[in-house]
Image (cartoon, rainbow, N blue to C red):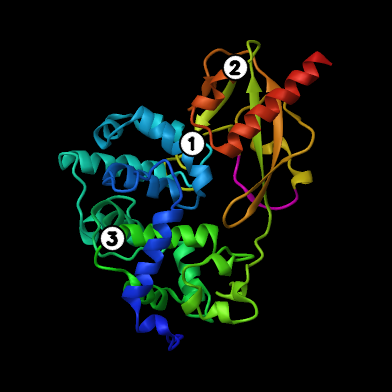
Amino acid sequence: MPTLNKTPLQRKPRAIAGSVLSWWDIHRRSLPWRPSAGEVADPYRVWLSEILLQQTTASGAAPYFKNFVARWPDVEALAAAPLEAIMQAFAGLGYYSRARNLHACAKAIAARGGRFPCDEASLRALPGVGRYTAAAIAAIAFDAPAAPVDGNIARVLSRLHAFETPVAKNRRAIEAAARALTPTSRSGDFAQAMMDIGATICRPRNPVCMDCPLKAVCAAARTPAPENFPPRTPKKANPIRVGAAFYARRADGAFLARRRPPRGLLGATMELPGGAWAPGDVAAIGPVEAPFPARWRRLPGFLEHVFTHFPLRLALFAAEVEFVKPPGDMIWISPREIATSGFSGLMRKAAETAGRLVGSDRQG
């Protein structure tokens, strides 16, 4: 494992933290979950934002955060909400296990009288709260001397020390570097400042080193190509998976959908019925996995979606049906209910695309 370079930053952590905080006092980003300067952070809003921000950008999480706090202004209100409503509010954000853990955690906090624990160990015992999230809540909401390390902070510290090991294989050294710089007071402000530096200055590509409050002590900034730190882990090639989704529509325009199992990919979200997704050729997909016999016809083209571990190509099939009672575990969904029924982004696109193609066929 790489050792920390012998740079001035090791001898002056307090001065370096002071420079970072002075920069942040002027340049802090305005985000929906951040209180104004001088105001105390609300643990509920800190926790909610950190869950929404997992695998999501600030701009992507912001509208969801605003919707959540408008509907459920405190943790007790969120705990009292049905899981289906939370899944609907999460629709399109991805990584739906977060929604289930969010609900379970809200219930656990509500059982404590609505009070969040303030130490990392107790926070980590909550559903869906991992090492980073616990440190972020402890630092930002309670100003505990915790050192959260998200992707932005990991990149800043890797460049600060010119670490030559990819982040995923260098967590221990990066976290040690974070703890070494974290001040005993304003720890939450310092963590957020480092996040903002990573988001706005120490970007993955084209870092703006001249504007960085750390430039005087940054080892990577003294190299010809600071953006080469940290080195990237080569991505493994993942085979394309293919599958089918079946759009069964009755005369009034309603179509059949079902809820996915609570665990696993897109867990507990609504979907068009279909079969398993497996490597193959989307052109060869047929209606063999249709949920029931009907006059299925393949719609033109296919949908593409990229998950974390594989890309997907989805063939769409449609059929007109006349039965009133939905078969099995399916329910009827009106087209105007698509946005509020808890579909994932992929399945919402599938339902809307199939509806549009079937509608154009009728008009033709």
Work out how far the residue at label 2 is from the one at label 1, CA to CA, in angstroms.
Answer: 29 Å
Labelled pair 3, 1 in contact (Cβ < 8 Å) = no
Residue at 42% x, 34% y is: 66
Q: Position of residue 210 (x, y in %)?
A: 57, 69
**Residue at the top extreme of this rendering:** 252
Q: Is residue 180 in view?
A: no
Give the image quarter of residue 172.
bottom left
Q: Position of residue 315 (x, y in %)?
A: 71, 39
Q: Nearer the viewer, mark 2 or mark 1?
A: 1
Q: Quadrant of the N terminus?
A: bottom left
Which residue was labeled with disc 2? 254
The segment highlighted magenta reads: 275-281
Category of crowding for the residue at label 2, using alpha-carbon neighbours closer than 10 angstroms: few (below 14), some (14–19), many (at least 20): some
Label for residue 63?
Answer: 1
Q: Is residue 76 above or below residue 61?
A: above
Residue at 47% x, 79% y is: 217
Q: Position of residue 281 (x, y in %)?
A: 75, 50
The majority secondary structure of the magenta stretch comes to loop
Q: Position of residue 228 (x, y in %)?
A: 61, 75
Label for residue 281?
Answer: none
| Picture mark count | 3
